């Protein structure tokens, strides 16, 4: 079973983050300066995933404003996809929301990004609208996805079941 370490993102991770950004999003990815300012934004939380050689293989981030958390990014380096790392990161964000009493989680995702939409749907996110032409590189629409209140039993039972199943698939140190 794959073992990974998940910890808060550090400035020294940013070269690795940018290299994954380039592979995940092509020329229109976030700059190193954008991540640098995110790391000093007190509303933001970013996490990095390291493999057993301490190489950066994935990361995610979110902002929390009062009761709402907004996922800004989740990306896994291509060679490590479909190993439940995206899911481990999403559960890290949801745990953080439980700890900080955020009730709702939202994000934007490209309408054509089937892997990401499937990941969010697995955890009960629903599409509640679109932003037309939100992505300027190809004018693609964004789906706006939301959880229901994450403290409600319906969300929590799906979450607990997924977390239990995740424990048998990936070892998070
Ligand atoms: N096709 C269909 N479903 C997929 C999928 C794919 N290619 N990739 C992930 N999923 C869904 C499945 O429901 C999967 O659960 P299952 O294994 O029980 O079927 C669930 O997501 C968890 O998959 P996981 O292995 O954790 O995904 P991942 O580690 O490969 O990460 C992304 C998923 C989206 C983060 C990854 O594809 C990625 O980095 N994409 C590029 C960056 C990006 O688009 N980020 C999202 C921005 S909103």
Image (cartoon, rainbow, N blue to C red):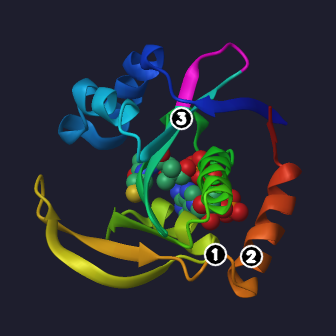
Instruction: Please state the horizontal and vertical placement of residue 28, each as a whole percent of the image.
Output: 18, 41
Q: Residue at x 45, y 51 (%)?
A: 62
Q: Is residue 75 visible?
A: no
Give whichever of 19, 101 is nearer the camera. Answer: 101
CA–CA distance in space, label 2 to label 1: 6 Å
| Left or right of 105 in this view: 88 | right
Ligand 1 resides in the quarter of the picture at bottom right
Q: Is residue 20 above or below residue 81?
A: above
Q: Main secondary structure of the magenta part?
A: loop
Q: Is residue 140 above or below residue 25?
A: below
Disc 3 marks which residue? 58
Question: Helix or strand or loop: what does disc 1 sit on?
Answer: loop
> Magenta segment, which residues?
52-57
Instruction: Please state the horizontal and vertical placement of residue 152, each as a whole percent of the image.
Output: 69, 84
Question: Helix or strand or loop: what does disc 3 sit on?
Answer: strand
Disc 1 marks which residue? 150
């Amino acid at each position: 079973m794959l073992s990974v370490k998940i910890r808060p993102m550090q400035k020294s991770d940013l070269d690795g983050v940018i290299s994954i950004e380039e592979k995940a999003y092509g020329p229109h990815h976030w700059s190193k300066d954008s991540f640098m300012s995110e790391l000093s934004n007190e509303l933001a939380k970013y996490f990095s995933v390291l493999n057993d050689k301490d190489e950066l293989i994935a990361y995610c981030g979110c902002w929390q404003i009062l009761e709402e958390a907004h996922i800004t990014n989740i990306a896994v380096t291509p060679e490590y996809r479909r190993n439940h790392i995206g899911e481990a990161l999403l559960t890290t964000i949801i745990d953080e929301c439980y700890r900080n009493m955020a009730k709702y989680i939202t994000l934007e995702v490209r309408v054509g990004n089937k892997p990401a939409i499937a990941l969010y749907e697995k955890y009960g996110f629903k599409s509640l609208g679109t932003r037309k032409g939100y992505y300027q590189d190809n004018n693609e629409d964004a789906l706006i996805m939301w959880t229901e209140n994450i403290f409600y039993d319906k969300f929590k039972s799906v979450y607990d079941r997924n977390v239990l199943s995740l424990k048998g698939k990936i070892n998070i140190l």
